[in-house]
Image (cartoon, rainbow, N blue to C red):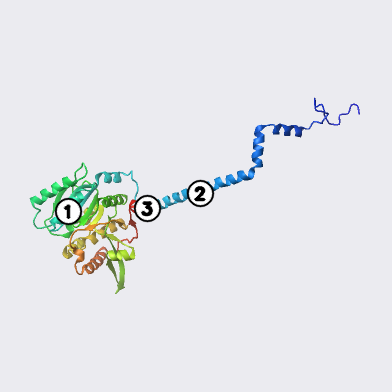
Amino acid sequence: MPGMTMGMSVVAGGGDGALYSPAKDKAATRNSNPFFFFCNNVNNRSPPLRRTRQLLASARIKVVLPLCFLFALILFAARAAQLMGWNHHASSSTSLTASRAGYTVLINTWQRNPLLKQAVAHYASCSGTDAVHVVWSESDPPSESLIAYLKKIVLSKSQSAHKPNFRFDLNEEDYVNNRFKPIADLRTEAIFSVDDDVIVPCSTMEFAFSVWQSASNTMVGFVPRMHWLDEEKDGSTYYKYGGWWSVWWMGTYSMVLSKAAFFHKKYLDLYAHKMPSSIHDYVISERNCEEIAMSLLVANATRAPPIWVQGKIYEIGASGISSLLGHNRRRNKCLNDFISLYGSVPLVPTHVKAVHALHEWFW
């Protein structure tokens, strides 16, 4: 009817009289847009895309999970080191000083000059050796020829520009306590105490020294020993001293012997001036057990176990005091007498062993 529009409009210039539809016009515009066409086709292929995303997510999980496990392992190792008393602060002044200064080799000898010559020549060749001291307790002083020979061998065997100091520490009395006498002019904090018939390879020495730097208050050595409660009777407690085979069988130790061990120089002063004089007298009368006395001293000061370092060492002598008949019985007696004098058992058992990871094919 004339004058009525009915809400419809005709497409201008359509030519066919078709009605105008905004929805159709919008759809036509989208379909003619190349970007919309690409997105629309991608959406139409959503299942392959979803699989791709799932594969990428799975790959990310496979990468992230091992990294998380490694991070957790590092945190656990750091925490374990703290609980053990290890201190891995390489930037600390103490560690840096000890690293630069190296260590002093303290050789205990007794009437075995051929063995002493071998020991001095070997330890002078180790790069970390800052000085070599020979504890001499014989009635006659060392001969001039022996002194000259050893000084010459130290200079010739040293592999570093800094040549180690060498000297004899002479003692008037033949006491086994002499091996732990204080040394006034030491330049190092680290002492490597060793018998004249024990050879530790230089590479093994350097590893043990690095272990000691991380725990410089304790003893770090190669010869572990143990103690355990044997029996109780009449109100008294008795302990037993265990040698190498006891350590091997039980996997536990509470001492490392000073026949091949690192410790801080301060323990020389403590041994000489702070340890009960009754223990000094006992060691002198028995001519034995000074190594147990030192282990008890360090354990009493730290309340921590020593550290046993895995490494091959060589005994070049024919035999030692440990081969004598009744040696273990005497050690049992020493241990119980020392514990009685201390009034407690400061020794701390442990199962930990320091192993050089680069030398292990599987760990």
- The tag earlier along the polypeptide, 3 or 1, is 3
Would residue 45 be found to the left or right of residue 300 on screen? right
Instruction: Please name the amino acid that badge 2 sits on.
Output: Lys
CB contact under 8 Å: marks 3 and 1: no
- The answer to which quarter of the image holds residue 343 is bottom left
Asked whether the viewer can see residue 265, the reply is no
> How far across and how far down the image is residue 210, in percent?
30, 49
Residue marked by disc 3: 81
Q: Which residue is mark 2?
A: 62
187 left or right of 26 in image: left
Q: Amino acid at mark 1?
A: Gln
| Rendering coords of residue 193 (x, y %) | 22, 54
Q: Quadrant of the C terminus?
A: bottom left
Measured along the vertical axis of the image, is residue 104 above or below residue 337? above
The residue that appears at 11% across and 50% down in the rendered structure is: 147
Q: CA distance from mark 3 to mark 2?
A: 29 Å
Residue at mark 3 to residue at mark 1: CA–CA distance: 37 Å
Is any atom of residue 342 visible in this view?
yes
Q: CA distance from mark 2 to mark 1?
A: 56 Å
**Residue highlighted by disc 1:** 118
Residue 253 in percent (x, y) is at 31, 62
Label 2, residues with CA under 10 Å away: few <14, some 14-19, many ≥20: few
**Disc 3 or 2, which lies upstream in sequence?**
2
